[in-house]
Amino acid sequence: MCKLLSAKAIRLLQGIFALKKLNKILLPLNDEYDVKDDPFHCFAIIDYYPLVYEDSIALMLELAVTARREIEKYGSVQTRVKYPNIGKYCDRNEDISFEKSLSKIIHAKTIRLQTKSDDGQVSYGYDGNRNSAFTGFALISGDEQDGTLYKATIDIIRMCVDIVMMDALSSY
């Protein structure tokens, strides 16, 4: 069960870092094989962007749920991870701890990955420029326990590193 955490964390990191390389390989194919004069033109690559995006969010949720279960089983790991804080509230200058961030991810109403295009434009979701890459951050929003709304950014890369460390520490 424990090694499953590291495998999922590494898959999530691969998805985040691979998108820029995929774009450089695949997006030029649409222009290369685009023949406007041909009425029988049928070449177009599938839109892989939503696939990678949705898979990354699903992996992030799976990791948060599985890691949270492991923490409940073994107790607090806050002092044994590399990054004790992996999140930050957007409206106030307050960090969110690793364990609390996992709970926020699980109970979030919306999760959107941050993307950055080649010209430096930052956006959330896959509505914008397809020639963009993930930055490694997610914007989540939801309700606090007292009913107030919150928005927070989560550093996915730090989360994955902490999960791999937590997995290594709990397996010996």
Image (cartoon, rainbow, N blue to C red):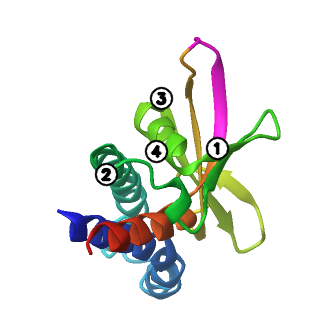
Please give the range of residues in magenta: 146-152
Residue at the right extreme of this rendering: 93
Choose the circle earlier in sequence order: 4 or 1.
1
The amino acid marked with disc number 3 is: Lys
* Residue 109, numbered label: 3
Identify the residue shown where x is 32% and y is 76%.
Answer: 43
Identify the residue shown where x is 34% and y is 52%.
Answer: 67
Report which residue position mark 2 lands on: 74
Q: Is mark 3 on a helix, strand or loop?
A: loop
Identify the residue shown where x is 53% and y is 54%.
Answer: 78
Choose the circle earlier in sequence order: 1 or 3.
1
Q: Is residue 108 above or below residue 37?
A: above
The amino acid marked with disc number 2 is: Tyr
Of 107 and 51, nearer the camera is 107
Label 2 to label 4: alpha-carbon separation: 15 Å
The amino acid marked with disc number 4 is: Leu
